[in-house]
Amino acid sequence: MKNINIIYLLPEMKGASGGAKVIYNHSSILNNLNKNISSKVIYLKKNFLYKLQLSLSKRIKFLDEKFTGWDGKKMKVSQKFKPNKNWYKDEIFSGENLNFNKKKDFVIIPEIWAHFAIDLKFAEQKINYAIFVQGFYHMNSTNNFIKLKKSYENAKLIITTSKYTISYLRTMFPKIKKKIFKVNLSVDSNKFKIRTKKNLITYMPRKLPAHSSLLIFYLKNLLPKNWKILPLNNVSENNLVKALSMSKIFLSFSNFEGLGIPPIEAALSGNKVIGYVGGGGFEYWKKPIFIKVENGEIEDFAKKIIKSIKSYKNNWIKDTRKNRLQLSNYYSKESEKESMILLSNKILKFYN
């Protein structure tokens, strides 16, 4: 059997990203699965002249109608980039160029760059590729719909992470139904644990900041004096784990997400999660741990927080243990690994 190299394309990003972390996890799993499979990540960035062109276009408002998405031919491989060790510590193998070998390379493109398959002429070169749709709300990578449709229909696989996203994909591109493959995501329950709880509410300001700032303002005169609110903004993974383990309530501002992971992390850390479902979250958003608020309903959001504070009992953690166990099993590392084994087997068949 041939040695197959599964290559993920990813933007060069300085800050934390849940989507990037998923790709790192999957690449790492693949490298430890099978001696016939290896995996690496190629980081891309806009070259200097392309960045200047886009900047000038925006300034003279030339881009709006004519913008067809980033041009894959004008992207540059970032040779020195490494993920921030504060939020991803495992070693990631990186690629150095976009010269793919049709006999052994399988390329996985993120949905934000789906049209790169056309830009880089994968079909003409007979390069096998998949599109990884983590967030279906980011599928409009170009306003050239014919180009986008062709990218999806020529792909060997369309990989996704939630049933919600699968539904969107089937509706948007009926011809790709048989190509869709769902991989499972995981949350490390050994890391996200329950510690001594404090009267603390946590949330992530980067998610819908206009909504969160308005809610925090609304709560100023309602929140009991012995309760505090802690924003989790640009924190290391260790500090994130620590904060969630101590808080009793986590506020979800999930928005346009294929599958929001932070609410799951908060739930496994013993939080009652109150807020927006965000689309793919419907898979796990169940009482008594998850309390739904309709997007934009700030008053209702505040009322549900205050109600949860007043009704909170010390035995709540014990009473919801079974619910957390079910959640942990569904999003376990074992489940994620099993789905990656199935994915790798599918990919290997393209090279037999």
Image: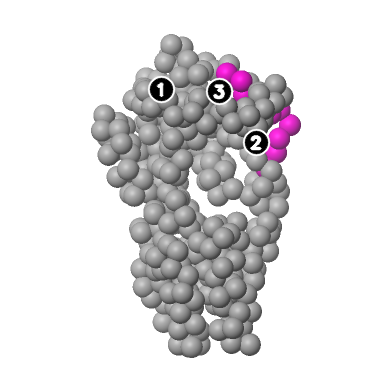
Q: Amino acid at mark 2?
A: Glu
Left or right, residue 299 beside residue 25: left
Instruction: Please tell me whether residue 204 is drawn above or below residue 149 in the rendered image.
Output: below
Q: Secondary structure at mark 3?
A: loop
Instruction: Please tell me whether residue 4 is drawn above or below residue 222 in the rendered image.
Output: above
Instruction: Please tell me whether residue 90 is drawn above or below residue 208 in the rendered image.
Output: above
Q: Residues within 10 Å of mark 3 (few under 14, many from 20)?
A: some
Q: In the image, is residue 27 part of the stretch drawn in magenta? A: no
Instruction: Answer with mark 3 or mark 1, whichever residue precedes in sequence.
Output: 3
Instruction: Answer with mark 2 or mark 3, whichever residue precedes in sequence.
Output: 2
Q: Which mark is residue 12?
A: 2
Q: Quadrant of the C terminus?
A: top left
The residue nearer to you, when weighing 325 against 110, is 110
Q: Closer to the camera: disc 2 or disc 1?
A: 1
Residue displayed at 64% across by 71% down: 230
Q: Which mark is residue 147?
A: 1
Q: Main secondary structure of the magenta part?
A: loop
Residue displayed at 57% across by 43% down: 20
Q: Which mark is residue 71?
A: 3
Left or right, residue 80 beside residue 324: right
Confirm whether residue 96 shows in the render: no
Q: Position of residue 96 (x, y in %)?
A: 66, 24
Q: Amino acid at mark 1?
A: Lys
The answer to which image quadrant residue 14 occupies is top right
Residue displayed at 66% across by 24% down: 53
Write the start and end of the magenta stretch as one range: 69-83
The answer to which image quadrant residue 173 occupies is top left
